[in-house]
Amino acid sequence: MNKNVHTFIGCDNDYVDSKIVIFGAPYDSTTSFRPGTRFGPSAMRNDSFGIETYSPYQDKDLEDINVFDSGDLELIFGTPEKALDDIEATVSKILSDDKLPCMIGGEHLVTLGAVRAAAKKYSNLNVVQFDAHADLREDYLGERFSHACVMHRCHDILGDDRIYQFGIRSGERAEFNFANEHTSLNKFNFTGLKEAVDKIGESPVYFTLDLDVLDPSQLCGTGTPEAGGVTFTELLDALKEVSKLNIVGFDINELCPVYDQSGASTALACKLLREILLYFYK
Amino acid sequence: MNKNVHTFIGCDNDYVDSKIVIFGAPYDSTTSFRPGTRFGPSAMRNDSFGIETYSPYQDKDLEDINVFDSGDLELIFGTPEKALDDIEATVSKILSDDKLPCMIGGEHLVTLGAVRAAAKKYSNLNVVQFDAHADLREDYLGERFSHACVMHRCHDILGDDRIYQFGIRSGERAEFNFANEHTSLNKFNFTGLKEAVDKIGESPVYFTLDLDVLDPSQLCGTGTPEAGGVTFTELLDALKEVSKLNIVGFDINELCPVYDQSGASTALACKLLREILLYFYK
Amino acid sequence: MNKNVHTFIGCDNDYVDSKIVIFGAPYDSTTSFRPGTRFGPSAMRNDSFGIETYSPYQDKDLEDINVFDSGDLELIFGTPEKALDDIEATVSKILSDDKLPCMIGGEHLVTLGAVRAAAKKYSNLNVVQFDAHADLREDYLGERFSHACVMHRCHDILGDDRIYQFGIRSGERAEFNFANEHTSLNKFNFTGLKEAVDKIGESPVYFTLDLDVLDPSQLCGTGTPEAGGVTFTELLDALKEVSKLNIVGFDINELCPVYDQSGASTALACKLLREILLYFYK
Amino acid sequence: MNKNVHTFIGCDNDYVDSKIVIFGAPYDSTTSFRPGTRFGPSAMRNDSFGIETYSPYQDKDLEDINVFDSGDLELIFGTPEKALDDIEATVSKILSDDKLPCMIGGEHLVTLGAVRAAAKKYSNLNVVQFDAHADLREDYLGERFSHACVMHRCHDILGDDRIYQFGIRSGERAEFNFANEHTSLNKFNFTGLKEAVDKIGESPVYFTLDLDVLDPSQLCGTGTPEAGGVTFTELLDALKEVSKLNIVGFDINELCPVYDQSGASTALACKLLREILLYFYK
Amino acid sequence: MNKNVHTFIGCDNDYVDSKIVIFGAPYDSTTSFRPGTRFGPSAMRNDSFGIETYSPYQDKDLEDINVFDSGDLELIFGTPEKALDDIEATVSKILSDDKLPCMIGGEHLVTLGAVRAAAKKYSNLNVVQFDAHADLREDYLGERFSHACVMHRCHDILGDDRIYQFGIRSGERAEFNFANEHTSLNKFNFTGLKEAVDKIGESPVYFTLDLDVLDPSQLCGTGTPEAGGVTFTELLDALKEVSKLNIVGFDINELCPVYDQSGASTALACKLLREILLYFYK
Amino acid sequence: MNKNVHTFIGCDNDYVDSKIVIFGAPYDSTTSFRPGTRFGPSAMRNDSFGIETYSPYQDKDLEDINVFDSGDLELIFGTPEKALDDIEATVSKILSDDKLPCMIGGEHLVTLGAVRAAAKKYSNLNVVQFDAHADLREDYLGERFSHACVMHRCHDILGDDRIYQFGIRSGERAEFNFANEHTSLNKFNFTGLKEAVDKIGESPVYFTLDLDVLDPSQLCGTGTPEAGGVTFTELLDALKEVSKLNIVGFDINELCPVYDQSGASTALACKLLREILLYFYK
């Protein structure tokens, strides 16, 4: 009898044959409001069998591409440094094998580990962020490694004019002020995305999708639901636009299954991941 | 003291006086992902008392029309054949009394029983389907009588160019290929509906509404929520269009109350049924 | 050590310094379908710490204005008269101190207490109501003080052409007939709002927001979810329009936390209240 | 086709043939903490089909006895007086036909309506109460007709030494003091029940079962769960003891389905009602 | 990178080295009340990481024994025959390799497939059943292959005096009558277990544990919770007693995660499975 | 108007007058399985108004004693060191004012901060722990400051024979081995408590109550429910025994409201805290 290999639907290929490598980063220790995103990756694997591998949007099928799902990292809760190190090491390994890392969070802080690895390989790295929250605090109650600060930490690495933010509709005034100086922040929706894609051109891009960019009507299963977000269809169109970029790594994060009684948020996240995999697979 | 008669709101007329006859088909044994639609009809009866009988959309009132609600069939779980037979017999009885059958599912397979009965009475029957899923599989893990195959089974009876599908956004590639050959499948929304209504003309039509055609933001209480669906308002407009057809039977199915913690899905289904009854009552 | 003062986020000023005074009216005894709105105000205080004090919509911050939150009234359940008296007394006190009362319900009947107080101070008071339900019944099962009758009771006080209703999509036929004679009822959305604002001009206005005016996809946590409502963005625009009026008191009601498993409804209500406070603060 | 008669399982007999008459009293307007018991009777009817009609405890079957279920009264929410009048009238009617009334609450205040009716027929009426709460307050925030005062109101009618309370483990100090003077209050469990049964002898007894007498581990679906209660088995034994009395009416109340996510509380309440019906049927 | 092998905690050994083989049988199509047990096995795998591998009850550790978890069978929903065939084939394969099959249901009907396989290998097979329900119906609404009939079907194979039932507290009168003639049925608890163990002696035994034998206070996450059951501790003692028998196969079934909001039922089922594995491993 | 002071019921006294000082420690960043205990203290304050201030168990009333509730500390999520420092400082302040600190967790790691403070004041401090889990790991995935290690960290401070553990029924084998050498560990229940109380005598004691010592049937709202625990009544008796000790500080922790759909766990925790306050108040 065979061992019970558990993957996201249609992602049961071998590592060596695969161009995209999925792994889960089930960490949520710095979440300031409602924790629980650590269960996001496993919930997505479980419920992915409620969707199909075929996309009628793109007329493509996960069965026709090679993706490997390595399961979840075993991350330490509490102190974020070690978790970030483990994530960085994993992404570095995948990048060094010339594969595309696809990380499933976890809270948004996990993105920092991946960006560290990508920035080491690509000195001119850009970050495109879809999110409800600016995540640009200098610190949160004194803690600099917090989900609320993750884009500020990325800016520490990347510098000015490298971070493109879309859908942002929550933050302190200071965060919006910071963005005016240092990032390209686009409020509420995807206005400006096409221009950003043109401007970035062939430069390498790390793409991070905080699922709370969606309106909570579409995705209520997240720690900090923020009204006034984008629809699934708007997001799909934006992903198509992003797929024109030179994506070198990406993540999808902040699904919090405990607030998803109906499972509709998890199902939507699964469908989005299918579309992203099909869009980004080259 | 009187017996406790329990009906959908405003549908407490006698059978003989009624033009529309409601019955529940609480069957969900072939559901492949998350079961529970068997409780749809009773949940709708219970919660229908949270809506009004009057429709400000149509300026009509359930109090002014005659509808009979006979309660739920007692269907056998497991093997679908017997359940389908019971449904077919019920619909045949209603049709033979020149009344309009209105079935509340249950899973979508129940439609097959009703279509069998309708096709026996109307040789030139058409089916109009609103659904997220194509339901066109030849079989599901070898089983030919499955909710995932129900439209293929209807095609077995009706033949080519008789099935009109709208809102479809999920299926295997093979299903979409099948549709290209044998049905009129309209992806994602109601584009093409007006043309279909014109084309069908006076031919008899069985209308089946899988509630998951709605976006999960509007109706999360269903077994397989599929993002990217239509809004309530779009659906209402489409129902108005459908009401121009020669409807000879209809159903509303796939409400799964256990995933409707807020009750908003059940309330919406009740409101839809009110609108449908008022639209289809001639 | 200091006492544990519990307020809506950013509303921790002193009474004397504040222009707006928040209080909760946790009463829901006449709710005809699903009770539970009594827990609305405390849920909003608790979860308000999941949003920010800063509004990127208005570029204003609750930190920059003075609002006092006095907590919940201790209202008697059962007979509504005493609860309405207590609410009226509280609002009268706030109005007599030339402050703006902001009541958090509770069921919609609580508005009657506030309107009584406001009508005593302002003889030419108007009421602007955003709601899914007309609330214009003469009585409900014989009871004249019911959430379903609250606007009829307000009309008893104010007379014809003083009540402006928006978003209404549910009621008995008799209620819509009553509205044709006595109020300005606008069905489904905010069409006509600009004209109403122009017409009202400088007259004093009590504004009442029944959260079920929102589509249940946006706010499922309410006793009687009614499909076909407005979006958060449409509501925000309408609130901006309303803020041009001479608001002398307002409320936000009908949040029912027990049907808000994800917390998204409560979060949205908090965000709305922040925006309203920033809009109405002059 | 027949109308859809909806009863508690096995209670589908005609009124005239039945010795026991069930009716629901879906009232909860004076509930001071968490409302929702109004949905208790319909939840019990719905879920009663998950239990059997046969009792292996008594080797008796509901199929062998005649019980009529008349459904729920349509009670007015808000002011309790009218609801109590309607309950009293219903119980009086049943008693005048020499049948045994079985009321399903609703909050505990509904018992007052039934006791009023029973006390009019039986001048020497006793009340046996199983409950976690003494319910002996003189008033609750000034309101004398409240669930928290129901036994005090019964005492107003019946006088001293007529009320036997068991399982009581919550109340104000003043309530326990009142009990010392005026009732027979037995704390925590059923100690003293046998003696009470002997003492009451052949006198007529109204029996009221507040389901929160059970430990919340057994029944969490109630408005005010109170740890330290009795087990199902202990309650069954106590019911057997109570059945030796001359029961002239009884109720089972305070099931609150919204806090019963698993349905186990409702299932237990159904099973209890089956046992009670079989015990009390003579 | 390694593939993501997903097993019950501590059961990650290879098939060839293992004495016990776990597999899931996620079938629930004949469930007559509330379906959902199909998600039992995966829920147990997921949540098993919330318990330890070490048992302080037995001072043994799953790390010290060899168990293989092969994941879930892919069973067809609807018609039970094919599912039963697949289960029988799997158990036969495990038995033919002289390993102990451990099946995780699913509904109780799955036991029939395993008993068929075991009875083919062991002509003198006995069945020991812990259950709230007798499961002895001849048929359920005409269907002979139903969870409510599974023990009757086992009796069809095994004949009289081979089935030992414990904890039974629900069934039709006819089922209890059948048991009087054909099985050893022990009501409510484990009285008689020691005697049964002595009587069975060295004969081969298939052990089936329907988790609803537990009181719903301990395990509410099941389709048909039945009050008056055994405690965890009583069950543990009974399992110790059963472990003295010559167990040739066993199952644990009827966990229904959707009714286990707290996860306590799933956690208990995991702990039970750990104890059973440690008890039955020889 | 007064500010809205929010306390545990009956604990609204001033700091200077109070002998017991309550504060919340809403930290759960090192939780290894399911987080969410950070919301324990606020949930208990909110729901404490569902219980009475009077205890029929002790015939004492919170109204008659002086307790101050200072609300929740604002703790940093992520790195535990700063949170522990803040807790230690708070407890030290309370101890230096000769008051009894009562901390509401939060995860169990918070106890370490309090024990540090108490051990500085009392060199011969003992710890009495009621818990399902030994919490004696040397580290958890390399992290030494984890809820799973908290008693090992206390041992680092206190040394051998100072920690008394009761109700323990989960842990690694190594933890039980450690206990054999260094602590007094009593498995499953409170056997040995009386002897421990006698042995400790007048020495100062910090008492820590992990609510998961209770059976999950009594308290399912916790991160890691562990079957086989004690009942509420057994716990009450044990608390009475503990109250004979020279208690210098105590805590109650690990309530996780998100897994307490019914509210019964929170209600029980509130009742326990009332009893503890009444027992420990001297």
Image (cartoon, coloured by chain):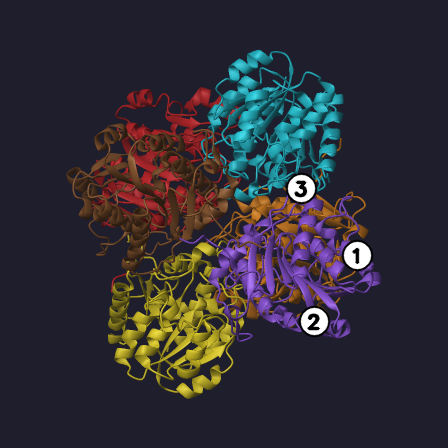
Chain colours: A brown, B cyan, C red, D orange, E purple, F yellow
Please tell me which of labels 3 and 2 falls first in the chain: 3
The N terminus of chain C: image quadrant: bottom left
- The residue that disc 2 covers is E245
Q: Nearer the viewer, mark 3 or mark 2?
A: 2
Q: Residue furthest left?
A: A181
Tag 1–tag 2 contact (CB < 8 Å) = no
Residue D129: quadrant of the picture: bottom right
Q: Residue furthest right?
A: E181
Q: Position of residue C221 (x, y in %)?
A: 45, 41
Tag 3–tag 2 contact (CB < 8 Å) = no
Residue F277: quadrant of the picture: bottom left
Q: Nearer the viewer, mark 1 or mark 3?
A: 1
Q: Position of residue D249 (x, y in %)?
A: 70, 55
| Chain that bears disc 1 | E
Tag 1–tag 3 contact (CB < 8 Å) = no
The answer for how far apart the CA atoms under marks 1 and 3 are is 23 Å
From this view, report whether residue C151 is shown above or below residue D267. above
- The residue that disc 1 covers is E157
Find numbered disc 1 in the image and state the secondary structure of the residue it sits on. Answer: helix
Q: Position of residue F261 (x, y in %)?
A: 49, 53
The C terminus of chain C: image quadrant: top left
| Chain that bears disc 2 | E
Disc 3: CA contacts within 10 A as few (<14), some (14-19) or many (>=20): many
Three-letter code for the amino acid on which mark 1 is drawn: Ile
Disc 1 and disc 3 on one polypeptide chain? yes
Disc 1 and disc 2 on one polypeptide chain? yes
- The residue that disc 3 covers is E78
The answer for how far apart the CA atoms under marks 1 and 2 are is 21 Å
From this view, report whether residue B57 is shown above or below residue D121. above
Three-letter code for the amino acid on which mark 3 is drawn: Gly
From this view, report whether residue A59 is shown above or below residue F264. above
From this view, report whether residue B225 is shown above or below residue C128. below
